[in-house]
Amino acid sequence: MERLIERCCGLDVHKATVSVCVRVTQRPGGELKREVRTFATTTPELLALREWLSEQRVTHVAMETTGVYWKPIYYVLEDGFELLLVNPAHFKQVPGRKTDVADCVWLAQLLEHGLLRSSFVPPAPIRELRDLTRYRKSLTEERTRAANRLHKVLQDAGIKLSSVATDMLGVSGRSMLTALVAGTTDPALLADLACGQLRKKLPELRQALTGRFGPHHRFMVSRLLADIDYVEEAGAELSRRMEELLAPFAAAVERLITIPGVQRRTAEVMVAEIGADMSRFPRAMPGRCLTAKRRQPTSGEPQNYASSSKKRASLTSLSWSIGLRMRLKLLAGSSQGRSGWAAVIGGRPRLPSEPGST
């Protein structure tokens, strides 16, 4: 097989060490020189790895995506070499590999012949923005968990505040919960803390706030309220930092908001996950996944959609299912309302039994 890259390297990444295989095609004659070394994953050792690869005049480096352990190595090498981050499930399925060949040797051999496909690694500003959006998502989930625990504690105490107040953690709800933690248990005094439209439900509030709120419930509610306050404060600080990092991508965010069902938070997540430079991705052929005609199998030829007597999902249904999951994931975490669901349902014609069909 033709060698496309004369000086290449394969990295087998582990937590504490990285195995390195360098393959060099020597001219004239085309003789192959191979050398395997092992380095630690500490920063001084990685700098030594970079220096050694430079001495060998390596141009391309391939490594597998091993958890998060590939990141320090990638960041040290990304400025000096052409890097390929490869999914292990892809290169290990390439036929021809012997069982006694190390991963770094096999990676270098495949890279030499141009048989590897690199995963998408965004530039540093997008990576930082991605860390913030994912951290914000985890903070939102933590607040939801704390609010659910608070609801359970109040139910255990016989306090039915959530049955009357729409938002238990709104202005009125927080005032009542703070008074409960301070020692006030009189339902009339607690109900009198209601604000706005909730004052129209004072009789219901007095009934809902009558319970057996004891010292244990007081301690639990105080801790949960402190957790919620911390998460909200951290989320506000995170949002301010995100605004600074999103400033260079403001135009892209504004364009994404014009898509029906996409609000600002969803647009920020889209920019953080795929960046603003679409030239990195191959151009798709519109409608190919759903409308392209597939070659019909000849008689006796096994079909991809059948395994024994079980029939698998067709290409159309699989494409629609994957697309729906991706769109729902992007819409998750933001209040899309009816427009968001319209964007999801709008991706395909409505069935006769669905609302809005004609």
Image: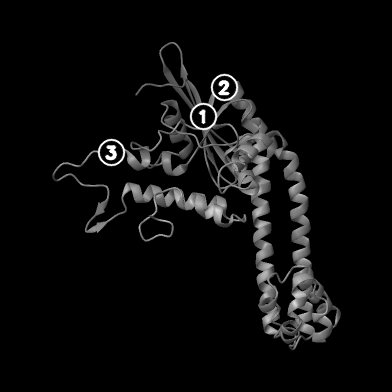
Q: Closer to us: mark 2 or mark 1?
A: 1
Please tell me in which quadrant of the rendered image residue 130 appears.
top right
* Position of 296 relative to 211 (above/below): above
Q: Nearer the viewer, residue 168 or 241?
A: 168
* Position of 136 relative to 205 (above/below): above
Q: Position of residue 308 (x, y in %)?
A: 22, 56
Answer whether labels 3 and 2 touch (C-beta < 8 Å).
Answer: no
Category of crowding for the residue at label 2, using alpha-carbon neighbours closer than 10 angstroms: few (below 14), some (14–19), many (at least 20):
some
* Position of 25 relative to 274 (above/below): above
Residue 293's mark?
3
Q: Amino acid at mark 2?
A: Gln
Category of crowding for the residue at label 3, using alpha-carbon neighbours closer than 10 angstroms: few (below 14), some (14–19), many (at least 20):
few
Query: Does dot 1 land on a helix, a strand or a loop?
Result: strand
Direction from residue 187 to residue 106 in the image, left or right: left
Direction from residue 216 to residue 71 in the image, left or right: left
Identify the residue position indicated by label 1 in the image: 9
Residue shown at 78% from the left, 63% from the top: 229
Category of crowding for the residue at label 1, using alpha-carbon neighbours closer than 10 angstroms: few (below 14), some (14–19), many (at least 20):
many
Q: Position of residue 280 (x, y in %)?
A: 53, 30
Identify the residue position indicated by label 2 in the image: 56
Coloration of the structure image = one colour
Q: Amino acid at mark 1?
A: Cys
Q: Looking at the image, is mark 3 or mark 1 earlier in the sequence?
A: 1
Answer whether labels 2 and 1 touch (C-beta < 8 Å).
Answer: yes
Residue shown at 76% from the left, 55% from the top: 234
Q: Looking at the image, is mark 3 or mark 2 earlier in the sequence?
A: 2
Q: Closer to us: mark 3 or mark 2?
A: 3
Q: Amino acid at mark 3?
A: Lys
